[in-house]
């Protein structure tokens, strides 16, 4: 946690109660940051997968319009 919070890089110059509150608060903030970043990464991955699926569908439709392979054939290939 010293990587995220510089306050932990040196000894606390305060009483035990304040030190405990500071540590607990930092843990809460740290966990919030981790959960927020994880959720954001999952959203980005989902968006990328949806875009890739749309691209595959567009390719299938485009190929079919020129008398190319059947839609089913292209979908099997893309899996």
Image (cartoon, rainbow, N blue to C red):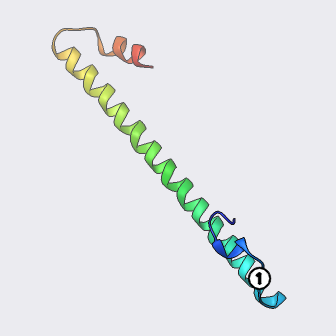
Write the residue at 78% across / 78% down.
11
Residues 38 and 52: in front is 38
Return the x and y of residue 33 as percentages of the image width and height: 58, 64
Q: Residue furthest right?
A: 16
Q: Residue furthest left?
A: 66
Return the x and y of residue 55 as percentages of the image width and height: 30, 30
Residue 37 as seen in the image, left or right of residue 51: right
Residues 43 and 58: in front is 43
In the rendered image, which residue does mark 1 sit on? Answer: 12
Residues 12 and 37: in front is 12
Residue 43 as seen in the image, left or right of residue 75: right
Give above or below for 59 relative to 12.
above
Quadrant (top left, top right, bottom left, bottom right) of the C terminus: top left
Q: How many marks?
A: 1
Write the residue at 22% across / 15% down.
64
Give above or below for 59 relative to 31.
above
Write the residue at 34% across / 14% down.
74
Residue 50 as seen in the image, left or right of residue 22: left
Q: Please identify the quarter of the rendering in which residue 78 is found.
A: top left
Q: Residues within 10 Å of mark 1 (few under 14, many from 20)?
A: few
Q: Secondary structure at mark 1?
A: loop
Q: Please identify the quarter of the rendering in which residue 62 is found.
A: top left
Quadrant (top left, top right, bottom left, bottom right) of the N terminus: bottom right
Return the x and y of residue 4 as percentages of the image width and height: 62, 66
Residues 22 and 33: in front is 22
């Amino acid at each position: 946690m010293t990587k995220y919070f510089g306050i932990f890089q040196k000894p606390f110059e305060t009483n035990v109660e304040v030190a405990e509150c500071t540590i607990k608060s930092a843990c809460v903030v740290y966990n919030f940051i981790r959960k927020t970043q994880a959720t954001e990464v999952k959203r980005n991955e989902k968006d990328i997968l949806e875009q890739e699926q749309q691209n595959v569908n567009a390719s299938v439709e485009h190929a079919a319009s020129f008398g190319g392979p059947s839609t089913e054939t292209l979908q099997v290939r893309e899996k």
